[in-house]
Image (cartoon, grey):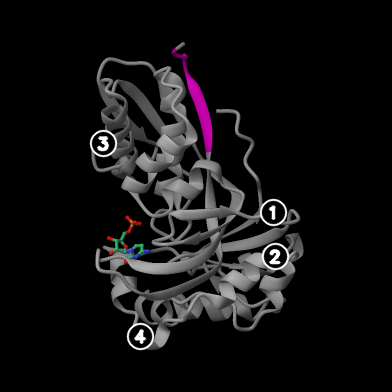
Amino acid sequence: MAADTLSIPAYAKINLSLEVIGRRDDGYHEVATILQTVDLADTVTLRPADGLTVTCDDATLSGEDNIVWNAAVALAKHAGVPPDACIGIEKRIPVAAGLGGGSADAAASLRGLNVLWGLNLPGEDLASVAASLGSDVPFLLTGGAALGTGRGDQLQQLPAVETTCLLLVAPGGTISRKTPTLYGALTPDDYSDGTQTRRLADSAALVTATLTSDSCHNVFTRAALEIFPGLSDVWESVAAVTRFPPRLSGAGPAFFCMPSDETEHVKVEAALQNTGATAYLVRTIIPAQAV
Ligand code: C5P
């Protein structure tokens, strides 16, 4: 049975750890990462329609260039149905920040269209379409906590971390072709063998271990602080008033301090005045799979 209108939250992710092991022959890099969803979310709304439209409250993200458009076309092709849907996105996750916003919207669209079009495809089918769209999309189909290997799309679900409050900071801007640029800025000296991330994944207390492990890091930190204009100033302003040091998310420029609380949020907001950066107090979340 096909459905009427569906509204689905698309949760952002952070990387609790991110190592790059080396370059692959297919142009990607082999990674070992721990991904975790947080409760900062876009909303994706899907309605039946003749033809495909993708609109966003940030008009620069409407239309065929949005990854959600590709998601609809790829799923329709996989299932042998026309890509008919009216898809609306309410954007709250900062764009191209390392928080998986576009990937989350694509993952939510795949789940929603599976219902809207009455396809009833199993999770493996959605995961293979998701992997064709981007390395983070398979994880964001389910969220929670997972170890990602391969190009980040080979997932091993991890036990849920205790719900933890953290402070996310998104500096105002980003750069074009961000992810390939950041991967391209890595040198073999930045590579490691993934052991730290795997050890962390085996830890019974993932969050506590994340905080106490000096060697658990994000491989892009050095390059991001060099490449994103103004990031190091924002980073230092935040580090000066938080109990725990900033950690980059994905290829940046967003970063997080964990755990955190409302008192620290107020201090960070004061420290970030006039910088164009935004601070969000969020919680780790295991999304309910209503759709
Ligand atoms: O998979 P996604 O579309 O997010 O990747 C964007 C780009 O980032 C890729 O084209 C590639 O240049 C780089 N990338 C990489 N290794 C990964 C993931 C992404 O080199 N594991």
Q: What residue is pinned by disc 3? A: 63
Marks 2 and 1: in contact by CB < 8 Å?
yes
The x and y percentages for residue 256 are: 59, 67
Front of the two marks 1 and 2: 1
**Mark 4 → mark 1, Cα distance in angstroms:** 32 Å
Of callouts 3 and 4, the N-terminal one = 3
Q: Nearer the viewer, residue 157 or 250?
A: 157
- Answer with the quarter of the image where residue 214 lies: bottom right
**Mark 3 → mark 4, Cα distance in angstroms:** 39 Å
Residue 188 marker: 4
Front of the two marks 3 and 1: 1
Q: Identify the residue shown where x is 71% and y is 72%.
A: 209
State which region is magenta.
2-9
Q: What residue is pinned by disc 2? A: 206
**Residue type at numbered disc 3:** Gly
Of callouts 3 and 2, the N-terminal one = 3
Q: Relative to residue 138, is residue 281 depicted above or below?
A: below
The x and y percentages for residue 117 are: 39, 19
| Dot 2 alpha-carbon crowd within 10 angstroms: few under 14, some 14 to 19, many 20 or more | many
Marks 4 and 3: in contact by CB < 8 Å?
no
Disc 3 within 8 angstroms of ligand 1 (CB): no
Of callouts 2 and 4, the N-terminal one = 4
Of callouts 4 and 1, the N-terminal one = 1
Of callouts 1 and 2, the N-terminal one = 1
Tag 2's secondary structure? Answer: helix
Q: What residue is pinned by disc 1? A: 159
